[in-house]
Image (cartoon, rainbow, N blue to C red):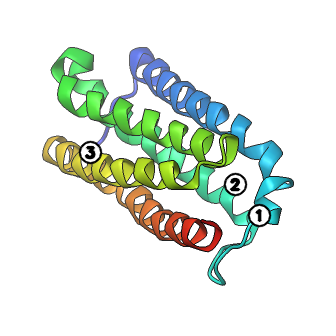
Amino acid sequence: MPMNLDRRAILGLLAWLVLVFAAAWIGSSATMPEIKGWYTTIQKPPFNPPDWIFGPVWTTLFALMAISAWIIWRPAGFRGAAVPLAVFFLQLALNTLWSILFFGQHAIGAAFVDIVLLWVAIALLIVLFYRRHRLAGLLQVPYLAWVSFASVLNYEIWRLNG
């Protein structure tokens, strides 16, 4: 099904990208100073990825999130997709909060609780988005996969560091 991209559609996509990457920037502001500081001093499991992998992975995931939300928003706006977009905003807030808890506050246990809630929100989001537009739901699957891995990593770091 081809999409006719009018001015509203293009501006809408840009707005979703700005919104999602603004949330990413807020989270990364807590993360970046700690990647070379506190995070280097804690114990990590052997399956911890190299630091350089996180930037490209998260950039890709945030772009997919924005495109997915845009696909849901485009036909009917916020009113027409209030519930799925509310869940989208919830997961985006939980995502941002995780970085603040884990890196900013060094609250590894609280970050684990947050990431479990984030996982549930993403799973629900996939269902809600998929029901409205198959591609929008499928675009969230890599995000759920990465957060699944990140949840295990968060738990192991919590376990290793008390």
Percent position (x, y) of residue 1?
A: 24, 45
Mark number displayed over residue 153? none
Is tag 1's residue or tag 3's residue first in the polypeptide sequence? 1
In which quarter of the view is residue 116 placed? bottom left
- Dot 2 lies on which element? helix
Residue with the most extreme left position: 131
x then y, percent, for residue 68 = 37, 41
Please tell me whether residue 82 is drawn above or below residue 126 in the rendered image.
above
Name the residue beneath numbered marker 3: 125
Q: Residues within 10 Å of mark 2 (few under 14, many from 20)?
A: few
| Residue marked by disc 1 | 52
- As shown in the figure, which amino acid type bears the numbered disc 1? Trp
Residue 26: % across, % down: 64, 31
Residue 14 position in % (x across, y down)? 53, 25
Dot 2 and dot 1 residues touching (CB under 8 Å): yes
| Residue closer to the observer: 142 or 105 | 105
Q: Residue 126, relative to residue 77: is it above or below? A: below
Q: Which residue is mark 2?
A: 55
Total numbered labels placed on residues in the image: 3
For the point 57% across and 55% down, the residue is 108
